Every structure is written in structure tokens, then in C-alpha cells.
């Protein structure tokens, strides 16, 4: 699938009509083939788009208006249901096209495994990149119940690709004993429970670097985001995640791409999860797309 194909469905608010006018591309990765608990995140991207209609077009956090950033919503990829490897290959090829045109890729998931092929494509263009990973779960398993392709494995795969010393995780409050031991033994940075305060302290170490940011919505406490497949008590507030997005925007790091994953709308009839997610997407666009 070409990233600049016309899309006739719902789009994120103020999407430009043409890819030529855009600095960034929003795209959906509707895959939840490998989830370990509750499916449904394949419906996340479109519901985030629907919720965006309620957003103000001006951000007081960034002091920017959405008309100041050109972005094109390319819609959801038509991924083959139940085929993880083929889906991951398609995502990788798709994001390579986005990067080849020097567009900022902003992906909407879908389960967290979809971040893996995106990061592979970004690494091919930016081999000096670092990863900022904001999540409740470590995602450092090599496999889950015998399956190497699992939404509990993407960060371990990234560590093997770019080196654990280039991976920085925040908000982590769930994982196996082996996952936490791996982080400690390899020197990978892991901030448990919190996000904004440790991120503030760390960003000076990443000055001037190219970074990719992956955000799992379950970093939020279920009180703020019940609509996710593997909710985990003890999380951060929506306010803290907004603060973290703003900290990255105000730092001297160079964001080269991002994603927001694991929104599963079926578990949240109040729609507070998709409403929050759409606001995070707005802030990422206004803060990280230069």
C-alpha cells in the first residue's frame, strides 16, 4: 500500500487534503493478532480520529494552532487478519515510503508489536537513533508462550537492534522477573512507575540526538484510560503524560517519529480513553513536528 493513496474514511481533525502539503503523516496500524489478554486495539485508530472532532485546534501547552503544522491522515493500512509476519512486513515497507519522502511518521495502533517494524524502518534511516518508550509494561520478553511475535516482545527486539544502552523506558510497573533483570544487567535505562520527573532529568543526556517515541496508552492508570487490552493499576495521570510530551517538545532532542498504541475502545463506553488519546496526538503533532 502506498502512503499517499487517497483515503475516503474518517480523518484526524484538520488533516490536509494532499500529502504534498504535509510535514507529517498519520497512519493507522489496525492489528491485534498477538495480544495476550483482551483484543480490540485494531479498532483504536478510527475511534481516535472520531474523538478528534471534539478537540480545540489551539494548544495552550504548545502555544500553537493546528493550522501551523501540515499533516496528512493516510487512514488505516489494510493488514491481513491473523497474519502477524505479513502485517509487520507491510508496516515496515509502508513507513519506509513515508521516511523516504522526509515526512514525520505518526502511527496509531493497534497492539504494541506494530511499533517493531516502524522502529526498524526508522533505524535504517537514522542509525544513531535512541528510543523513548513510555509504557506500563517492560515488553522485554523474547517470547510469550512460545511465540516470538507477541506484543510483549517489541522492546526486547529493539534492544537487540539498536543496543539496550540506546533504549529509555518510563512508567514501567509490570513485567517478569527476567525482564527487570535484563534491564539491570544490560544497563538499559528503566524508570519505574513515573514518567515526567525522570524524563526531565534524562533529556539533557539526549541533547542533539534523533529519537523515536513509542507510547502505550496503558501507561495511564485505568482510571484515566480503561479502554486498553492489558490495563495495569498504579499508573500515571493524563496530566503527567501531557507534561512528558511537552518536555520532549521543549528539549533539544530531534524527534524523527512516534506512535501511540494499545487503545481498545470496546472496554471504555465513556470514550475517555479515545478522547485522551486524540489530545495526545494533537500535542505530539504540535510539539514534535518542526
Image: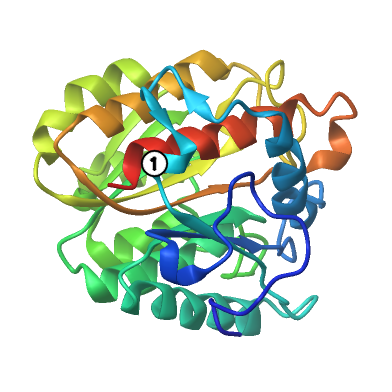
Between 191 and 238, which is closer to the camera in this rendering?
Answer: 238
Quarter of image, res 150 = bottom right
Q: Quadrant of the N terminus?
A: bottom right
Residue at numbered disc 1:
68
Q: Can residue 117 be seen in this view?
A: no
With respect to residue 72, does 178 lie above or below?
Answer: above
Between 200 and 187, which is closer to the camera in this rendering?
Answer: 200
Looking at the image, which residue is at 48% across and 59% down? 154
Number of marks: 1
Looking at the image, which residue is at 63% across and 85% down? 86
Where residue 189 sits: x, y (%)?
26, 37
Looking at the image, which residue is at 35% across and 25% down? 246
With respect to residue 6, does 199 lie above or below?
Answer: above
Where residue 25 sits: x, y (%)?
48, 61
Secondary element at tag 1: helix
Q: Residues within 10 Å of mark 1 (few under 14, many from 20)?
A: few
The colour scheme is: rainbow
With respect to residue 142, does 231 lie above or below?
Answer: above
Where residue 268 sits: x, y (%)?
84, 30
Looking at the image, which residue is at 48% across and 83% down? 93
Quarter of image, res 257 = bottom left
Where residue 10 sits: x, y (%)?
76, 56
Q: In this view, does 187 lie to the left or right of 249?
A: left
Between 235 and 63, which is closer to the camera in this rendering?
Answer: 63
Q: Is residue 37 visible?
A: yes
Between 153 and 171, which is closer to the camera in this rendering?
Answer: 171
Q: In this view, does 15 lie to the left or right of 48?
A: left
Amino acid at each position: 500500500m502506498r502512503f499517499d493513496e487517497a483515503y475516503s474514511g474518517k480523518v484526524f481533525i484538520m488533516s490536509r487534503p494532499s500529502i504534498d502539503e504535509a510535514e507529517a503523516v498519520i497512519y493507522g496500524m489496525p492489528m491485534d493478532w498477538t495480544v495476550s489478554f483482551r483484543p480490540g486495539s485494531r479498532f483504536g485508530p478510527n475511534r481516535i480520529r472520531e474523538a478528534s472532532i471534539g478537540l480545540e485546534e489551539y494548544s495552550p501547552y504548545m502555544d500553537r494552532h493546528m493550522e501551523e503544522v501540515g499533516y496528512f491522515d493516510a487512514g488505516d493500512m489494510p493488514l491481513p487478519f491473523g497474519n502477524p509476519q505479513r502485517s509487520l512486513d507491510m508496516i515496515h515497507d509502508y513507513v519506509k515510503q513515508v521516511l523516504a519522502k522526509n515526512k514525520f511518521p505518526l502511527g496509531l495502533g493497534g497492539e504494541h508489536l506494530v511499533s517493531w517494524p516502524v522502529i526498524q524502518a526508522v533505524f535504517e534511516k537514522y542509525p544513531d537513533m535512541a528510543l523513548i518508550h513510555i509504557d506500563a509494561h517492560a515488553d522485554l520478553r523474547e517470547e510469550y508462550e512460545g511465540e516470538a511475535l507477541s506484543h510483549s516482545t517489541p522492546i526486547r527486539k529493539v534492544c537487540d537492534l539498536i543496543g539496550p544502552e540506546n533504549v529509555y523506558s518510563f512508567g514501567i510497573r509490570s513485567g517478569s522477573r527476567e525482564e527487570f533483570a535484563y534491564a539491570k544487567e544490560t544497563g538499559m535505562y528503566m524508570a519505574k512507575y513515573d514518567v515526567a520527573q525522570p524524563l526531565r532529568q534524562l533529556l539533557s543526556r539526549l541533547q542533539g540526538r534523533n529519537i523515536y517515541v513509542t507510547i502505550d496508552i496503558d501507561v495511564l492508570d485505568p482510571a484515566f484510560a480503561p479502554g486498553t487490552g492489558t490495563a495495569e493499576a498504579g499508573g500515571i495521570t493524563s496530566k503527567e503524560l501531557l507534561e512528558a510530551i511537552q518536555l520532549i517538545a521543549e528539549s533539544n532532542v530531534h524527534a524523527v517519529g512516534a506512535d501511540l498504541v494499545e487503545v481498545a475502545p470496546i472496554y471504555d463506553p465513556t470514550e475517555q480513553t479515545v478522547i485522551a488519546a486524540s489530545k495526545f496526538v494533537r500535542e505530539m503533532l504540535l510539539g514534535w513536528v518542526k
